[in-house]
Structure formats: structure tokens, C-alpha cells
Image (cartoon, rainbow, N blue to C red):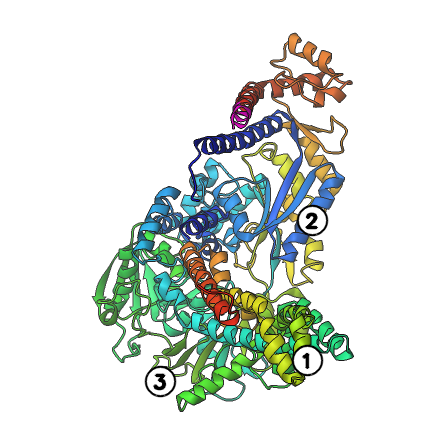
Amino acid sequence: MFLFITIMFFIFRLMPGNPIGLILEQYNLTPEAAQRLIHLWGLDKPVWQQYLIYIKNLLKGDMGISYVYNAPVSSVIFSRKLLNTLALLISAHGMALLIGMILGVWAAWRRGTPIDIGTLVTALVLYTIPVFWLGLMLLMMFAVHVHWFPLSGTITPARSYKDILQYIGDYLWHLTLPMISITLIRLGGDFLIMRNTMINVVREDYITTAIAKGLPEKIVVWKHAARNALLPIVTMAGLDMAFVVSGAVLTETVFGWDGIGKLTYEAAINRDYPVLQGLFFILVVVVLLANFLTDLMYAYLDPRVRY
Amino acid sequence: MGLRFNTKIIAASIIMTVFIVSMFAALGGALRASAAAKPLKLKFTVMMPSYDPVRIRAGELLADYASKIGIKIIPKPVDFNYEIGKVQDQHDFDLYILGWSGKNMPMYISEFIRSSEDRPGGYNIEGVHNATLDKLADELDSAIDFKQQQQIIWKIQEILADLVPWIGIYTRYLTQVWSVDWTGFHKEYWGYASPMTWRTVHKKGQTGGTFTVILADDLKSENVYLQKSIYESMVWSALYDTLVYLNDSYMPRPWLAYKYEHSADGKVWTFYLVHNATFHDGTPITAEDVKFSFDIIKKNNIPSFSRIAQYYDHAEVVDKYTIKVYLKKAYAWFLFDLASMPIIPEHVWKNVPWNATKPPKVGSGPFMWAKRVEGEYVELVKYPHYWRSDMPKVDKLVFRIITNFNSALLAMQAGEADFYVYYIPTSAVNTVKNNPKLHLNLQAGFTFYYLGFNLRRPPLDDVWLRRAIAYLVPKEQVVEGPLNGLGKPCTWYISPYFDGYNDPNVPKKYPWIGSIQPQLDKAKEMLAKSDKYTYKDIDNDGILEAIPKAHTTTTTTTTTTSTTTTTSTTPPAPGTSTVTVTKTVTSTSTVVSTTTATTTVKKGMPSSQVAAAIILIIIFLIAGIWIARRK
């Protein structure tokens, strides 16, 4: 982890360009003022010195001050943006996982039938669609032609709410389209993995035994086969969930969903080093945590695994 | 098990690392050595930001035309920030295309031509060093009389047109889109709506209601002094009033100061404030508040207002509504800067640090702060006691944040927003034009997209070569092609949209600036006129070489020419003075002697570097083999 932080630190600084590049083109800063900004941000010190300062502050739990927001990095990241991203991605990934799993099990059980082939083709198509295109299409259909859903944002601008329920309702209404678009994109991959493992499981002897025992089809499929086919998709889901905190840049941009993905993109464009480092630091922590949780899940799903 | 520390493995890995590093170093040295030994080929790369198809196409077209007269230009679209880093910080470029409006605005031009700005990160990217320009730049910034300014700025334009350190390609129309139900709009500033628009906009035939504006970027803080982008200034210009404002021809006019005057030397300015203006908490706006608004900028050297911080010295309150402002020296563009300087209440700010992210937002403008949801919207409501009782005309002003321009245009089409000022891609223009509910306002502006030369890098230090390339820039073709007619070819150094500052004689007197279509024969003519280099394709590869004229007959001795002729049939060994070019040269002896003269100067150092590198490599190879065998 320490290694990772170090590599990140230097990679960001190796990126060409500097944090005041963008400000320069928009503002006519006087040369002295630009120099002062560089000094203020500590960018005139040698890189190794900047690095030591960064590590020292990080150990104290201080991730630095954002160049763009002029606020502590932690308050920039742990804000409404993180909540928005979590709401969007957890719901979308969960939905995709659920639907993908059920469809995958079902298609594998009915392998070779037109239904299976139909779902397979649909899944492949969904898997390859560019997410921003899908997003724009959804917007055109449901927000511009028929005004069923709003165009962007997480809530209606300048609206006053009677109670918290109304607020949540408005939020969910805005959440629908971005969630659907991520669900559709994710669905294909989840479906394919589930179907593949399920096809292998179905060929196992214990399934034949179960059928021979005269157990009802439902119990064979869901209790015997599906449970055993869960392991790969749980691993995948665990890792995916880790990336939930990194946001979905394209979807967030198209739907104007103010989240971490947009923040990452913006920080990279503006060379906002402290924010970038903070984001990746949190990402590393969450990836490690997610791996740990996945291991725990294994023990539950597969009795052979004991810790 | 456990890991045992094997010293041999560690030693071997260290040696391997050093070996690999030295390999790269040697390779780099060798490459640089070979690059230095070549004659000056007319082979350049042109960088442009990869996000803008128009500028990419401009570079490609330029490359096409240049290749027809033997100049090889390689278009290289790169990340915007990378380009800025290469161009402005490292000065590592041949040609580059960027858009920088300041470069053709009278109030900023002086920064771009000062030789003191030729430093990493400075504004003098091209490396212009001209004593007259330095003098004129200083004179311009302290000239307060319009006639005097005009005289100086015309001179600057003539010198620039003669020197050609950069050349304008096109200017892009400023675009505003609004819903046809609304009226009372003003001309756009550079990239954002005029502050006057918020004060006068209203629905046709009625007042009141909510006006929704699309903001292309969220506020980065809730402090006017920490503003980071021009979009933020749109919000602040509705919340705060200024002493003066810029009218539709960008000239300063009285506003909160109903009258102003300056002393003969331009260092003392007196402002007379309107008497009935109040802050949003009801307290009157007085000279003390104006003095405080100046002092806070000076005291903290606030970057967004760095010019005021630089020139303002102190202020003197004459009476409740009169203030005298003393400048350190006369400053030509003082009023322009005042048009964006917010007047803030002293009683609120005196106990708040200037860089607080969420200070109290008691403003002086036509709208009061109501609510902000981060990343979503900023809501302002009408201030009922605004000193102009006829303003503002709407009850609510909502800035809705949509960063993606496709989504923004969809929002306009769906009627979810009433006003949009930002970049509209040329491909989307027709969608907007054909929508009966939307009005597309095109306005010639002073955006300035230009091609810059690196004057430090021979042969680009030759003015005739720069003039030749200027003749090749396909300005009209870029405007009509990729820009879809939404702009104009640039034939100026100071935008003609500033009345009186633009020198109309430049395009005629300096035809390479006035040229809007590639003229190959003219370009060739320019090359032939050069007094610095002879441009000739000596190795017959279709690319011209530049041969310095100054050194032609002076230093070449008979011995060097004889070595040239002896080695001309075989490829030269590394370390000897001759280069590949001489192989093909057979005809004129003068040319041969010139090339040898230029290359002998540069030979010594690189060859010793290469030798050292080779020895290093051999040592490390032996060491590596030895360790590997021992294991």
C-alpha cells in the first residue's frame, strides 16, 4: 500500500502540464500572481521534499488542500458527491447482479433453446454498447421527447420540499435513468459469467444425482446448481464493488450526476494533485477491504473454505 | 520457509538496474548526438489541443500546404495541459496552435511581448526579444489617454506584423442560446454573459418569474475572491455590483459610481457613488466600503484580481459618497479591471478571512443569495431595494449546473433552461438553429486562435521563414470547413472588435498577415529573400535544408573539405566530423564547405559521450556475466 501511494504520487507529478495551466488561459493572471500561487501550493520545492511533506501529513490523517476547491481534500471527497456516487453505483450494480444472475441461471438451464440464444445475443449487444451513447439515447427518448424523466442533476433545481419523503422521491426520480443505463451496461457481463459457470455446474454428477432422486426442478436449479455456480461471480462482484467508489465518469457526465467520477476527471484535467492522491488512496483502501469481504463470503458459500 | 537474503541476487539486480539505466542514457546521448549533427532541416512539429477538431484540422491543412514547398510540418494533437507544459513551461516546441484571447486584446498585449516574460511559465512563449517592444509595452500600460494608447498600440501592431512571432488563424463567434420567450440580453463578454443581462432580462411583455441559466461548471467555493473560472464570475456578477460596467462595445461606463475623474498624470482617480445604494442587509454602500473592497485585494494580493493588487496604492475617503483612489503608477486599463471588482460590505467582511470557503454572502447587486446545492444549482432571488428601482426584472435567477454541452443543449430543447452561454460544437449549431423555440445569437468576438513560432529554435529565428509559413496558413479554409462558417479569418494582432485600437493598415502593408488563403509562390519568394539562410534541398529528400549565410566563406580550411570528399562515398564513422548529407553533395563546392563548417562546430562533445556510454555498457555487461556465472 505504501508502495502504491508512492507510485501514485510520482505518476501524477510526471504528467506534463501544471496546475496553473488552465487558470492561465481563462484568467489573465499577472506573472507575479502565478508565481505566488506556485509557491503557495509548495510546487516550487523539489519533488522529494513535496513527497516527504505529503507522507508526513498523510500519517497525520491530513490529505492536503485542493488547489481548485481551496478546501481540505477530505471535505471535497466525503461530501454529497460520494453519497451520490454510492447511491447510483450500488443500486445499479446490485440490480445488474441480481438480474444477470437470475437470467444467467435460467438461460444455462434452458441451454440451446431460442430463449437462451436470444438472451445471449442481447447480453453481448449490451456488453458492447458505449455507455455515453446509451445514456444520450435514453435522455432523448425519456427526457426530451416524452418528459417522463428529468434531464440532469440529482434533484429538481430550486424546488422546495414539504418533507423528506418528497425529497427522496425527487432524488429517486432523477436516479432512474442513470441507474438504468449502468444496469444495462453491467448486465451483459454479469449474465455471461453466470451462464458460463452454470453450464459447467449443470454437467456435474451431483446434479444428475439430484435429478435422478426425483427432486423438483426448482430445487435442483436454485439450491444445488445455482449456489455452486456463485463463486466466480461473487469474486467479480467484490472487485467491482471496490470500484464503486471511483465512480462512473461517462455516465455521471452525461446525466449531470454530481459524483466522484466527475470529480476524478476534473481533478485530472486541472492537475489537482491533492484530490487525485486522496481519491486513489481511498480507492486502495476500499479495494483491500473488498478483497477481505470477498474472502469472508467464500467461507459462507463454500464450506470447504475455512479460516 | 522464509526468504533468505541472497547478496548475490541483490548485487546482480542492482547492477542490472544500473546497466539498463545507462543503456537508456547512452541511447539518449547517441540520439541527441545524431540530431545535433544534422543540418537544419525544415522539419517541424505543430502541437494543438486534441479536444478541438477545428484546431487539429487547421494544423493538418497547414502541413499539407507546407509540404508543397518543401517544408515538412508534422501535426501532433496532444492533451491540452501537456501542450501548455511543453509550450509555456519548457519552451520545448517548434510550432503550436492555441486559443488565447488576451493575445489580441489591447489591455493584455503588453504581457506577451516583454522580453522579461521569456522565462519558464512566462507569457512570452515565442521568445520575442525586441527593445522597442519592451519600451512600448511599458508606455502602453501607463498611457491613460485614448489617443496616446492608440498611437502606441498601432506601433506595436506594425512591429509584430513585421516580426511575425505568431500569426492569427481564426476568431470564433461567441455563441449564446436563449429561449425565444425572453428578451433584454446583452452582448457576451469573453466566454460568459454580460453582468447587465441579469439586470435587464425579462420575459417578453411581462416582469417577474424565474430565469434559469445553464452554468457549465459548479462553483468551487462560495467566495467571490476564490473564483476559479469564468462561469463562477457569472454568478458573482449578479450578486455584487461594481463601480463601472462595460457596455456593448466593451467601453467602461459609470454604474455604482455615477461619475468619475482622474488627475492629469493618471495616478489619482475620484469616484462619486450613487446615494441610494444599499447592501442586501439594508446598510448603505459608502466610500468606506469601496475603500475596504480595494484594501482587501491589495492586503491579501488576491490572485483573481492581481492587476488591481499590483497597481492600487491606497484610497482616501473624501466624504460618505466620494472616494479618491491613488495608484502606484498610471495604469491604462484601470477601469476595465474595476468592471469586475466586487463592492463588498466592510462590516460583514472585516472579521472574515478573505479566503474562507463559505463567507456570509451579503452582496451589493440586484440579486440576493438564496440557496445552493453543491453540484446541482445556485438560486438567487431579487433584491427588492436595489438602487435601480427598475432592475432586476425577474424574481428569481437560477443557475443550473450542467457540465456536458450535449446535455445542456438537450435541456434547452426540453425547455428546462432559458439561457446558455458556452461552447457550442459546430455540429450542434444546426439543431439549435432549426428549433423554433430557441434563438442562437452569434456575435463576432475577440477569441483568438493562432499559430506560434519558437524563435529560439533555428531556423525559426529567421523572419523570412516565418513570413513564408504565414503565407501558408489556410485561414479561410479553416473557417469555412471545420468551423462551419462560425467565425472569421484573423488578419490582425489586435482585435478589430475594440473600436480604434486595431490598426487597419496592417493587412495591406504586411501582406503575409493579410493573406487568408495559402499562396505558395509568395511563400517561396519569402524564402528566397532570406538574408540569414539559404533554403535548398541538398539531399534530395523533398525537404529543404537551411544553410546559414553568415558562415559561408569564412572559416573552412582545405583540410576539412578534403576529408569531406574522401569520406563522401562511405558512411562516416562516428566521431569524425562529416555527416551523411555530404554523401549526395557533388555539384557546388560552396554548399559542401558550408555544411562542413556548420557541423564541425558541433561534433566533439557528443562523440565523447557516445564513447563513454559504450565503455560503460561493456563494463556492466562483463560484470553482469561474471555474476551470473558465479551463481
Asked whether the beta carbons under mark 1 and mark 2 sit within 8 Å of each other, the answer is no
SS at mark 3? loop
Q: Are marks 1 and 2 on the same chain?
A: no
Relative to A11, is B162 on the left or the right? right
Secondary structure mainly formed by the magenta segment: helix
Above or below A174: residue B125: above
Asked whether the beta carbons under mark 3 and mark 2 sit within 8 Å of each other, the answer is no
Whether residue B437 is visible here, answered yes or no, is no
> At 66% from the left edge and 65% from the top edge, which residue is drawn?
B426
Residue B202 is a magenta residue: no
Q: Which residues are magenta?
A: B623-631
Task: Give the foreground label among 3 and 2.
Answer: 2
Cα separation between marks 3 and 1: 80 Å
Say which amino acid is labelled 2.
Glu
Task: Give the foreground label among 3 and 1.
Answer: 1
Say which amino acid is labelled 3.
Pro
Cα separation between marks 3 and 2: 56 Å
Could you classify mark 3 by the number of other residues whose Cα lies within 10 Å: few (under 14), some (14-19), or many (20 or more)? some
Identify the residue under disc 3. Answer: B384
Position of residue B107 measured from the top left corner of the image (x, y, whole percent): 45, 54
Q: Nearer the viewer, residue B381 or A141?
A: A141
Could you classify mark 1 by the number of other residues whose Cα lies within 10 Å: few (under 14), some (14-19), or many (20 or more)? some
Chain letter of the residue beneath label 3 in the structure image: B
